[in-house]
Amino acid sequence: MFGGEKNAFAGAGHEDDEIFLNLTPMIDILTCLLFFLLLSFGAVIIALISASVPVISEGDPDPNYAKAKVTMGLQITENGFVVTASHDTMPESELAKLKKLLPRTGKDKTYDNKGLHEHLWWVKKRFPNSTSIIITPAPKIPYSVLVEAMDAARDRAGGTTKRPIRVPIFPDAVVSTIVE
């Protein structure tokens, strides 16, 4: 009888005994599988795809990229910071000027958060419309290093002594991961 139970209300004289299947273990397994399936889709690969359409124009392209929005990339490795930039239409030679390697410094091999802050501020002055940075920490990077890097990229003190303000540098931070 499929390991089920008989109906308690069925009399002794009934020929049609009802069979009840115990579906609780199967529902438990499906619930767990659904949870892990949803959890596995949480790891999303962020990729930048150039989808811009070329425009026909009658002149030379404007080499002034001051109004452009670059997306900065920050890799946090065991050796230090690697800063990169991406843009849909900007040539690689321009983007290479924004790249910088910031190795760990000092006897205690601390991360160069001040150097990172200054470099990102330099980029922000060149591209004031830019607000996004994609931070990719290596798997063994402590959480405190990630938070300090985000703080270095977020904003900068500005204004006057009577009216201080915080000037945003790259406030839109996205934390990503490297998929192997």
Image (cartoon, rainbow, N blue to C red):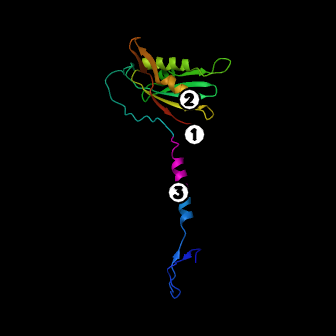
Crowding around mark 3 (Cα neighbors within 10 Å: few <14, some 14 to 19, many 20+) is: few
- Residue 32 higher or lower than 52, as above or below: below
Q: Which residue is mark 3?
A: 31
Crowding around mark 1 (Cα neighbors within 10 Å: few <14, some 14 to 19, many 20+) is: few
Q: Which residues are magenta?
A: 32-44
Q: Nearer the viewer, residue 169 or 63?
A: 169
- The residue drawn where x is 53% and y is 47% is 39
Taking the image as drawn, is residue 97 in sight? no
**Which x, y percent locates residue 59?**
33, 21
Crowding around mark 2 (Cα neighbors within 10 Å: few <14, some 14 to 19, many 20+) is: some
The Cα atoms of the two marked residues, 3 and 2, are separated by: 34 Å
- Residue 165 higher or lower than 89, as above or below: above
Our reading of the magenta stretch's main secondary structure is helix
Q: Is residue 116 left or right of residue 132?
A: right
Q: Amino acid at mark 1?
A: Val
**Are the two marked residues, 3 and 1, in contact with CB atoms closer than 8 angstroms?**
no
Q: Amino acid at mark 3?
A: Thr
Numbered label attached to residue 146: 2
**Does residue 42 show up magenta in the picture?**
yes
Q: Which residue is mark 1?
A: 179
Location of residue 171 (image quadrant): top left
Which SS class for mark 2? helix
**Which x, y percent locates residue 48?**
46, 35
Location of residue 58 (image quadrant): top left
**Does residue 102 show up magenta in the picture?**
no
Label 3 or label 2, whichever comes before in sequence order: 3
Label 1 or label 2, whichever comes before in sequence order: 2
